[in-house]
Image (cartoon, grey):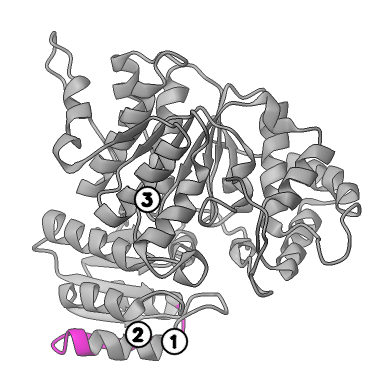
Amino acid sequence: MTYPEAIQFLYGLRLFGAKFGLDNTFKLAALAGEPQNNLRFIHVAGTNGKGSTCAMLESVYRAAGLRVGLFTSPHLVSFRERIQVDRQLIPKADVVRLVGELQPLLKQFPPGHHPTFFEVVTVMALKFFAEQECDLVIWETGLGGRLDATNIVTPLASVITNIAFDHQQWLGDTLAKIAAEKAGIIKPGVPVVTATDEPEALAVIGKTAQERNAPLITVGQASRLSPFERTRTPETGVTLILPLIGEHQKINAALALATVAILQNQIPVPDETIRDGLAHVSWLGRLQLIQRPNGQKVLLDGAHNAAGARVLRAALEQLFPAADKTLVLGVFQDKDWPTMCELLAPLAARIRTVPISSERSADAGELAAACRAANPAAEVAACDSLDGALKPSAADDFVVVAGSLYLVGEALEWLGHSPAAGERELNEWHHAPLTRCANSIS
């Protein structure tokens, strides 16, 4: 089997759609030798900020000398981004080998119960991390938490970044229902850390933690900056340097630091090491500023839902208030794109809407109409591709590419900041209807 053939096999698993439930993943992991039993995890769920928080935790523990696995989704360009050890992408040869090893196991599932793409990739990651003898795995949920394939592990700590409206068709149409799904990662006796400040959602998380005797640590508005103060050294007065821009990243950092603090007895990390780890964290596609050879600045941000758009708007108003902005926007149809247009369109002088390379893409013409309504003074155009939007923007000083992470990945390729891999389509996990299984961890 070649690497392209392995990717094609994984691509074919999308036809099985997505299933909420843990039976398949437990069974496949058992057939693969229960690799999760040889690993330690920090399990991260939430609506936004999961990836950034995972990247911060990974960087801190790697700075402490641990061998750290990182499992995240979706990928921006290459499938291999999903499974990393010490921030090195899984080698192509290991992707091929692991696909080959799991293929015979998949034949032991009856018709109608074939593991999905995400279930197979989850077990691939577990096998690889166990083989690599990782000291710790930073383990991000795919969708929700309670019935997500990643929820077969018992972590050292559970982290819930925040709760906002997203994926309502699967997770519920109220913050309480969404919070209940995210809180499903809380395990008996395992501490849980959250930056959730929505009272309705926090009440659900608190109730779940209490029922499971799980210590709950909240990183609230008043204490969000306190972890930064704790990393100051009396000798030098040096405070934390965080390379990820945006006020929201301070909240994610405070959440990561609180998680490190509650695990100090199990994995001690000195303050100096914490500071060093956060100072060197990197995470592509989230308020990522690129300066092109001609001096043009391009800001990439995967603001893929209304809550993300609010964060992006706040960052643009705070960090780039005087910039003459061109907005390139592409969003999924199943997101609250009218609200996203209302939030972002007023900030730009020029707006170019684009389709995403996905059957779930919102129509560029409809996006343009919504943006035009939100900002009648702007120059608004619907383009047929990202290339068709960026080429006419070549002379613009400041371009914001925002919306789906699919679009951000395509922009990274277009800008030459990531080699073309042709694997973004693997993110299309629900060609078949998503089904909900009855099994769960309660």
CB under 8 Å between discs 2 and 1: yes
Please tell me whether residue 101 belongs to the stretch shown in magenta.
no
Q: CA distance from mark 3 to mark 1?
A: 36 Å
> Is 332 in front, or is 392?
332
* Residue at the image point whose x is 52% and y is 51% from the top: 145
Nearest to N terminus: mark 2 or mark 3: 3
Q: Position of residue 74 (x, y in %)?
A: 54, 56
Q: Is residue 430 above or below residue 234?
A: below
Residue 52 lies in quadrant: top left
Q: Name the residue: 49% across, 75% down.
A: 356
- Alpha carbon distance from label 2 to label 3: 35 Å
Which of the image's four quarters has the C terminus? top right
Whether residue 417 can be seen here:
no
Q: Amino acid at mark 1?
A: Asp
Which label belongs to residue 363? Answer: 1
Q: Is residue 362 left or right of residue 245?
A: right
Q: Is residue 383 magenta?
A: yes
Between circles 3 and 1, the one closer to the viewer is 3
Taking depth in this image into account, of 355 and 145 the one nearest to the observer is: 145
Which element carries disc 3, helix, strand or loop?
helix
The residue pinned by badge 2 equals 367
Vertical side of 19 occupied by 154: above or below: above
Instruction: Judge depth for marks 2 and 3 and give the one in front.
Output: 3
The residue segment tinted magenta is 373-385
| Residue 168 drawn at (x, y percent) | 45, 69
| Label whose residue precedes the other's in the sequence (3 or 1) | 3
